Image (spheres, rainbow, N blue to C red):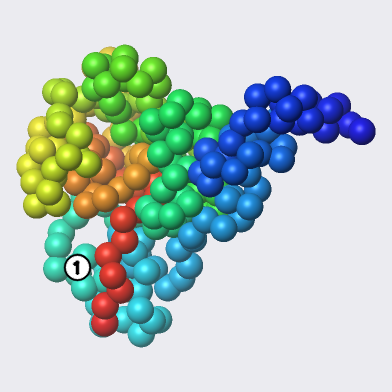
C-alpha cells in the first residue's frame, strides 16, 4: 500500500472527515476536503454563452451581438457595462454552491487550487489575453474576521500575474442580505485604486477581475468602473460560480 493510502486509512479511522459538499465520509481524506464524486458532478456552463455576462444562451441563433460581433443575451444588449466578458465554472447551485460555501465560510482554503484549475479551463478564452488578474478586495474588517480573501486565493491559481490594485473604501452590508435591486446601490463608491505603485501600472492593460461568486454582477461591475477610469484597455471577469439568468429567446 502506498504512503498516501496508509495516510487515508489512518485519517479515515481517527478523524472520519466528511466531504465538505455532500457530507459523506471521505474515502481519500489526504486528497482534499471534497470527494471525487462531488468534483465530477458539479454543474458546468457549456456553449453557447453570452459573450459579455457568460450566461447560457438558448441556442446558437442570436438576435443581438456586441461590438466584436459575438452573441449576447437580451439583458446585456440593453445594458451598458464596463466589462467586456465574464466567465464562470458553472451555476451557483447544488454541489458547486456547497464547494464554494466550504471554501469561503468554512476556511477550506485548499479548495482554491482545484477551483482555480477548473476556472482556468472554463475561462481559457478570457485568461489567455490577460496582462494581469485583480482580485476583488475585502474590507479589512471582513478579512480580519474571515482570515483570508477568497478572491485573492483563487486569483493566485490562474497562472496570470496577480496585482492587488483595488481597495474597499467602506465596509458594505453583505450582498447576500440585500434584494437584487439594492445591490448595485450598495456597491456604489465602495472601491478605489489601492494607494502606491499599482496606481501607475494599469494604463493600457487588459485586466481580468476575479471573485468567488457573481450574483447580480454589482460588485464586479463597480470594480470594473474603477479600473476603466484608471486607464485599463479592457476589463473582463471570472468567478468560480455565477447565479445565471434563465435563458430566453
Q: Farthest residue toward the right?
A: 1
Q: Farthest residue toward the bottom?
A: 61
Residue depicted at x 8% and y 46%:
182
Residue 217 coordinates in the image, percent (x, y):
24, 50
Residue depicted at x 68% and y 33%:
29
Total numbered labels: 1
| Other-residue count near label 1 (Cα within 10 Å), few / some / many at <14 / 14–19 / ≥20 | few
Residue depicted at x 40% and y 21%:
148
Residue 130 seen in this snapshot: no
Residue 16 seen in this snapshot: yes
Give the side of residue 41 with respect to residue 203, left or right: right
Residue 83 coordinates in the image, percent (x, y):
26, 51
Residue nearest the viewer, comparing 39 with 74 = 39
Give the side of residue 13 with respect to residue 131, left or right: right
Give the side of residue 117 with respect to residue 134, left or right: right
Quadrant in the picture for the N terminus? top right
Residue 108 coordinates in the image, percent (x, y):
50, 29
Residue nearest the viewer, comparing 132 with 3 = 3
Residue nearest the viewer, comparing 190 with 203 = 190
Above or below: residue 46 compared with residue 124: below
Give the side of residue 36 with respect to residue 105, left or right: right
Residue depicted at x 27% and y 21%:
142
Residue 78 coordinates in the image, percent (x, y):
14, 68
Quadrant in the picture for the C terminus? bottom left
Q: Secondary structure at mark 1?
A: helix
Above or below: residue 67 compared with residue 90: below
Residue nearest the viewer, comparing 69 with 8 = 8
- The residue under label 1 is 75
Amino acid at each position: 500500500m502506498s504512503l498516501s493510502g496508509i495516510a487515508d486509512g489512518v485519517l479515515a479511522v481517527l478523524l472520519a472527515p466528511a466531504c465538505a459538499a455532500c457530507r459523506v465520509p471521505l474515502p481519500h481524506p489526504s486528497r482534499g476536503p471534497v470527494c471525487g464524486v462531488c468534483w465530477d458532478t458539479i454543474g458546468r456552463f457549456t456553449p453557447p454563452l453570452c459573450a459579455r455576462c457568460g450566461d447560457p444562451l438558448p441556442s446558437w441563433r442570436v438576435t443581438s451581438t456586441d461590438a466584436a460581433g459575438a452573441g449576447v443575451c437580451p439583458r446585456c444588449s440593453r445594458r451598458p457595462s464596463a466589462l467586456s466578458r465574464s466567465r464562470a465554472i458553472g451555476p451557483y447551485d447544488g454541489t458547486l454552491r456547497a464547494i464554494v460555501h466550504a471554501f469561503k465560510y468554512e476556511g477550506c482554503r485548499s479548495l482554491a487550487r482545484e477551483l482555480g484549475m477548473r476556472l482556468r479551463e472554463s475561462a481559457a478564452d478570457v485568461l489567455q489575453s490577460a496582462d494581469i488578474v485583480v482580485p476583488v478586495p475585502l474590507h479589512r474588517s471582513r478579512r480580519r474576521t474571515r482570515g483570508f480573501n477568497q478572491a485573492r486565493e483563487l486569483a493566485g491559481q490562474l497562472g496570470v500575474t496577480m496585482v492587488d490594485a483595488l481597495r474597499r473604501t467602506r465596509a458594505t452590508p453583505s450582498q447576500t442580505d440585500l434584494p437584487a435591486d439594492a445591490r448595485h446601490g450598495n456597491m456604489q463608491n465602495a472601491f478605489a485604486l489601492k494607494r502606491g505603485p499599482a496606481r501607475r501600472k494599469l494604463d493600457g492593460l487588459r485586466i481580468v477581475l476575479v471573485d468567488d461568486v457573481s450574483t447580480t454582477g454589482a460588485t464586479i461591475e463597480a470594480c470594473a468602473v474603477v479600473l476603466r477610469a484608471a486607464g485599463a484597455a479592457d476589463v473582463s471577469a471570472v468567478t468560480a460560480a455565477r447565479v445565471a439568468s434563465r435563458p430566453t429567446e
